[in-house]
Amino acid sequence: MPDNIFPKRLEWLMKFRNVKADELAAYVGVKPPAIYALLRGDNFPSGHSLIKIAEYLNVSIDYLVGKVDDYNTIVAENDEEPLKEEILFIRRSYQKMTEGERRVIRSLIKTLIEEEKSKPETNDN
């Protein structure tokens, strides 16, 4: 594996996913200069950080380190279909919310589910 593949892939993914270094740093639990060092190839992330980076960018660790070339191979847990961009958007938006905003979203979802359950079933036979 070429030494410079990780920084190149990280940079490309951050541009492609429109992720800023400070956002990624906050999710990983490091300061932005640590992300810039990764982008320059000065450092390589710890195992924990590598997992968090892959999670946030919605790619496999294998893609980040150059073992596979398809970045779009993440699958949902217990699902065979690749995660769609909509799911990535929802996930990233949720991660950026405050706990209060998250409670509101959870409440809205529960309300929608309950409303759907209480609708009378229609039989168009």
Image (cartoon, rainbow, N blue to C red):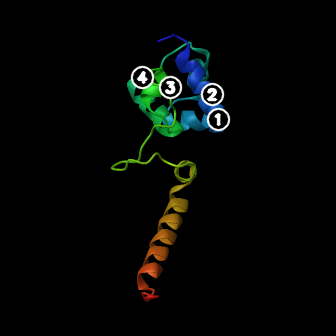
- Seen at 50% across and 30% down, the residue is 70
Q: Give how far across and how far down residue 31 sits, in percent.
A: 56, 29
Q: CA distance from mark 2 to mark 3?
A: 13 Å
Q: Amino acid at mark 1?
A: Phe
Residue under numbered circle 1: 16
Q: Nearer the viewer, residue 4 or 123?
A: 123
Crowding at label 2, few (<14), some or many (≥20) Cα neighbours within 10 Å?
A: few
Q: Are marks 2 and 3 in contact (CB under 8 Å)?
A: no
Mark 2 in CB contact with mark 1 (< 8 angstroms): yes
Q: Quadrant of residue 62?
A: top left
Question: Residue 25: x and y, percent?
Answer: 55, 33
- How many angstroms separate mark 1 from mark 4 (CA)? 23 Å
* Mark 4, residue position: 46
The tag earlier along the polypeptide, 1 or 4, is 1
Front of the two marks 4 and 3? 3
Image x and y of residue 16, in percent: 64, 35
Mark 1 neighbour density, 10 Å: few (under 14) some (14–19) many (20 or more): few
Q: Amino acid at mark 4?
A: Ser
Cα distance between the residues tagged 4 and 3: 22 Å
- Is label 4 in contact with label 3 (beta carbons under 8 Å)? no
Contact? badges 2 and 4 (CB < 8 Å): no
How many numbered discs sit on the rendered protein? 4
Front residue (pair 66, 46): 66
Q: Which residue is mark 3?
A: 69
